Image (cartoon, grey):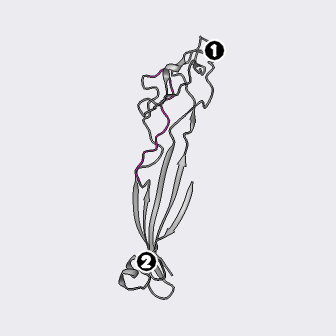
Amino acid sequence: MISWVYELPFGTGRKYLANGGMAAAIAGGWQFAGITTLTTGRPFTVFMQTGVNNGAPSWPNRIGPGTLDNPTVDLWYNPADFVAPPANTYGDSGRGILYAPGHVNFDTSLSKRFTVVGQSNIEFRWDAFNLFNHPGFGFPNQNFDSPTAGRITSTIVDNRSMQFSLKFNF
């Protein structure tokens, strides 16, 4: 996670529009800030939809890596790399052996303070959460013997949302 603040270079005393005037008053004093989050995929475990231990949990036997060269939301891992173990055994597939998709997210803010009287000011702010509206996909169906095995049908982040606000500081 990276948080950052950048004061735009416009207005009195800045690189551009440094001499003041109406343009400097309008364009000056703006800040662009944000939080950028980069995550790798979270580990997940492949399960069996129907156990082989008279109701006790069962895990499959792993006969291949389970990974795909080009996974998609329609098929994130290879269910054919897992088979049901013999009856009354637990299977040899490990815990957390595969990874769900990673995610990149940008939450940003554009703000400016306008002086009212003395030390008082009004801060205008525009916030955008998940600025690029990038879906953060959740876990795939982890039951390898399900008809929808490997399919991702959920997200772990909200869609883009924006808000405007005014704050009076005195």
Q: Residues within 10 Å of mark 2 (few under 14, many from 20)?
A: some
**In 3D space, how far apart are the residues under numbered discs 2 and 1 (Cα atoms)?**
73 Å
Q: Residues within 10 Å of mark 1 (few under 14, many from 20)?
A: some
Q: Nearer the viewer, residue 67 or 20?
A: 20
In percent of width and height, residue 62 lies at: 58, 20
24 relative to 59 in the view: left or right: left
Find the magenta span and give its range: 132-146
Q: Is residue 118 above or below residue 83?
A: below
The residue shown at (42%, 45%) is: 135
Instruction: Check disc 2 and report its element: helix, strand or loop.
Output: loop
Badge 1 is on which residue?
A: 89
100 relative to 154 in the view: left or right: right
Instruction: Check disc 1 and report its element: helix, strand or loop.
Output: loop
Q: Quadrant of residue 163?
A: bottom left
Q: Nearer the viewer, residue 10 or 86?
A: 10
The image's mark for residue 16 is 2
The image's mark for residue 110 is none
Q: Residue furthest left?
A: 22
